[in-house]
Image: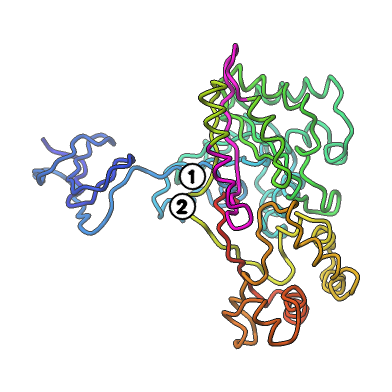
Amino acid sequence: MSHDIIIKNGLYFDGSNQPGQLRHIGIKDGRIDVLSLSPLDESGCPEVLDADGKWVTPGFLEIHSHYDAEVIAAPALKESVRHGVTSVTIGSCSISMALADAEDCSDLFTRVEAVPREYVLPILQQKKTWRDAAGYRAFYDLQPLGPNVSSFLGHSELRVAVLGLERATSKIKPTEAELARMEQLLEEALDAGCIGLSVMTTKLDKMDGDRAWSSPLPSTFASWTEFSRLFAVLRRRGAVLQGAPDAVTKVNVFAFLYQAHGWFRKPLKCSMLTALDLKSQPLLHRFTRLSGWLANRVLRGHFRWQTLPAPFNLRLEGLNVNAFEEFGAGEILRNIKDPDELYAKVLEPEFRALFKKQVKAILTKGLWHRDFSDCWVSECPDASMVGKNFKQLGAARGLDPVDAYFELACQYREALKWPPATATSACR
């Protein structure tokens, strides 16, 4: 039998837990036709690929990406495809680009995802001509997409589209007509092909732009009454809820577990993002396993945690640290927009004392271990500092590690690059 493509001598993985095995693969009409232990007949085959020394795997699924702006600007997503990704999901964490205008979408997206507003906003202003989910779908139908793309409807964007940016980022409750409009737009998004709704309940991520600068995302202002009405639509339609519990208190995890349960009703498909910093909270992974077992086995739910399989390091510059949002003094820094005012703030003795007190507080630890002795300099104009942590640098100057960090940040600003060592397993 002739094949359209033959991939020979590859170490083949089938996506299960089984180790890779040498296989020869025959592809016909776009599908795997033969998996063979012995070489295939190459007669008449127009394309034969020798995968000796290479892996052959199923396509990787990127279930939590923030490609929302990039896929509009560069729909091929070549870098992901180059790494074997065949499907990506966008619209996570309550942020999407289906309903609101270009500036609203930019302000929801850019600071949260650390993408420069000056690049994203012009792209959206040029290309975003739609204001509904059907138009969003139609746009992608015309694009030369690299991987398959699926999208959630973001609850923060949904609130902005219905309430306006100012009301969406306030404690004002939506009217009955506005709640009904949210339900209608969610139904329309599911009709257009969205796979579900994404929400956000942690207030660490903040808005960009001048109109709602440093406000938490609109989804965090919603009541559970509002959530429950939208979740009922998802449950009825068999759609997916993607969200994130409060990263600091974590108490509302139980509310999401309740929403997912399937006792005497259809379970809600629920996927929750979690950040497991096993340095600051070494037992947290046991809680996620227990809660998942409770939700699915006892409560008959359809609940999954989203985590990465391996730790990663952050790349931070100067005082630009998103994790500072976790405590009051750090939040003060994050709310200062002017760079000169920002770096002047950490020179104030009263502020430094407050920062050092709060950074050491145990009960408020969230996504970051806050140990400056485990944070080192990776790049700096003074090469002698590279590779040293702030405790070492402080000891050489007779300073506390936090004071050493502030001194170097003020001296070098964004030229100071420092990745905090972390055991976090999360997707951000």
State the extent of the magenta-drawn residues as a range. 260-289
Tell me where residue 140 appears, x and y as whole percent.
55, 38
Q: Residues within 10 Å of mark 1 (few under 14, many from 20)?
A: some
**What is the basis of the colouring in this image?**
rainbow
Tell me where residue 364 appears, x and y as whole percent.
75, 52
Which amino acid lies under the numbered mark 2 shown in the image of this protein?
Ser
Q: At 60% across and 80% down in the image, what residue appears?
A: 388
Q: At 60% across and 87% down in the image, what residue appears?
A: 383
| Residue furthest out toward the top | 264
Evaluate if marks 1 and 2 touch, with contact meaning CB atoms under 8 Å apart.
Answer: yes
Q: Is residue 354 above or below residue 207?
A: below
Tell me where residue 386 appears, x and y as whole percent.
59, 81
Q: CA distance from mark 1 to mark 2?
A: 9 Å
Q: In the image, which is nearer the foreground, mark 1 or mark 2?
A: 1
Based on the picture, tell me whether residue 54 belongs to the magenta stretch.
no
Residue 21 in the figure: left or right of residue 371: left
Q: Does any portion of residue 12 appear in the rendered image?
A: yes
Depth check: 410 or 62 in front?
Answer: 410
Residue 351 in the figure: left or right of residue 179: right
Residue ID for mark 1: 62
Q: Is residue 204 above or below residue 258?
A: below
Q: At 52% across and 31% down in the image, what residue appears?
A: 293
Residue 209 in the figure: left or right of residue 239: right
Based on the picture, tell me whether residue 281 belongs to the magenta stretch.
yes
Residue ID for mark 2: 80
Depth check: 387 or 315 in front?
Answer: 387
- Mark 1 or 2 closer to N-term? 1
Q: Residues within 10 Å of mark 2 (few under 14, many from 20)?
A: some
The N terminus lies in quadrant:
top left
- Displayed quadrant of residue 92: top right
